[in-house]
Image (spheres, rainbow, N blue to C red):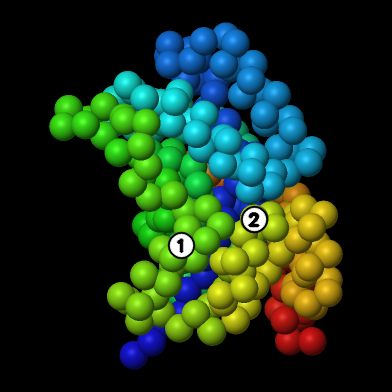
């Protein structure tokens, strides 16, 4: 029996910034980055927030990432991300995205977190969001676990389409009844392959396309920490979680109204 899914782009859709660039400071403090590289990270973050990124820019960022990470050990990066996630993610996640993720789960859909960032960064974020299905960049390593300047899997543009098609065929996912959320026109191929594309905080190009095709457009604004998502041995519900649920419900109501209209 076919199942449905919801594919969420990560950067500026589920979280408010670039997931890779968000860890620039901890990587600098741990000695993985020099001051000059950290400055380039900061400038790149500013440009990304203000103007978004086209596919050429993202391809350049991929090549720079490969050169930068070559020689790093996979386990060390995974440990660094886990140890600093709380610091980096205060706040980081859009509450409106959390509401949609929960709603899709309640309706029986598989939820995928999709990103061109390395899986060593995306997977811990997904775990704290309660998302186990991850589509992220996989960098090759040598036999000792050190990164090589080579890509094993790169989910960007057509790359996302190929990976999603492979998963859909393997697991029997009905893409015509599935959803895709993104902020960028670089994800247009992914959005066109599902029956329910939704633009979130869209860049200029994607907004124009969404308006022309009458796709739902959502604006996410309320940022909360991912940390309250971790199960805790207490019946108390945090104020941030309650506030997120109340505020984010508006976004979901808007989506349902526009989708049924």
* x 69%, y 44%: residue: 53
Quadrant occupied by the N terminus: bottom left
For mark 2, give the secondary structure: helix
When the figure is inspected, residue 140 is found, relative to residue 36, above or below; the finding is below
- Relative image position of residue 69 (x, y in whole percent): 41, 26
The residue at which mark 2 appears reads as 186
The residue at which mark 1 appears reads as 112
Q: Which quadrant would residue 76 be assigned to in this image? A: top left
Instruction: Judge by depth and name the residue closer to the eye, 154 or 101.
Output: 154
Decide if residue 108 is on the left or right side of residue 42.
Answer: left
* x 35%, y 78%: residue: 169
* x 43%, y 16%: residue: 32
Q: Which quadrant would residue 189 be assigned to in this image? A: bottom right
Q: Nearer the viewer, mark 2 or mark 1?
A: 2
Neighbours of disc 2 within 10 Å: few (<14), some (14-19), many (20+): many
When the figure is inspected, residue 106 is found, relative to residue 206, above or below; the finding is below
């Amino acid at each position: 029996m076919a199942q449905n899914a919801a594919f969420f782009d990560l950067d500026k859709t589920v979280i408010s910034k670039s997931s890779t660039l968000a860890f620039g400071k901890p990587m600098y403090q741990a000695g993985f980055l020099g001051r000059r590289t950290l400055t380039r990270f900061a400038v790149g973050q500013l440009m990304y927030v203000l103007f978004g990124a086209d596919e050429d820019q993202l391809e350049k960022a991929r090549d720079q990432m490969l050169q930068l990470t070559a020689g790093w050990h996979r386990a060390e990066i995974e440990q660094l991300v886990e140890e600093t996630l709380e610091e980096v993610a205060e706040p980081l996640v859009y509450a409106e995205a959390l509401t949609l993720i929960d709603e899709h789960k309640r309706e029986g859909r598989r939820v995928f977190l999709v990103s061109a960032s390395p899986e060593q960064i995306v997977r811990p974020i997904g775990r704290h969001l309660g998302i186990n299905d991850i589509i992220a960049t996989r960098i090759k390593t040598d036999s000792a676990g050190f990164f090589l300047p080579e890509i094993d899997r790169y989910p960007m543009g057509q790359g996302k389409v190929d990976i999603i098609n492979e998963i859909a065929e393997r697991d029997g996912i009905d893409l015509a009844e599935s959803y895709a959320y993104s902020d960028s026109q670089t994800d247009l191929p992914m959005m066109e392959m599902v029956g329910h594309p939704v633009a979130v905080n869209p860049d200029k190009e994607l907004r124009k396309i969404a308006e022309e095709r009458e796709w739902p457009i959502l604006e996410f604004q309320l940022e909360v920490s991912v940390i309250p998502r971790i199960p805790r041995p207490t019946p108390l519900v945090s104020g941030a979680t309650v506030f997120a649920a109340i505020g984010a419900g508006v976004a979901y109501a808007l989506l349902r109204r526009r989708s049924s209209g």
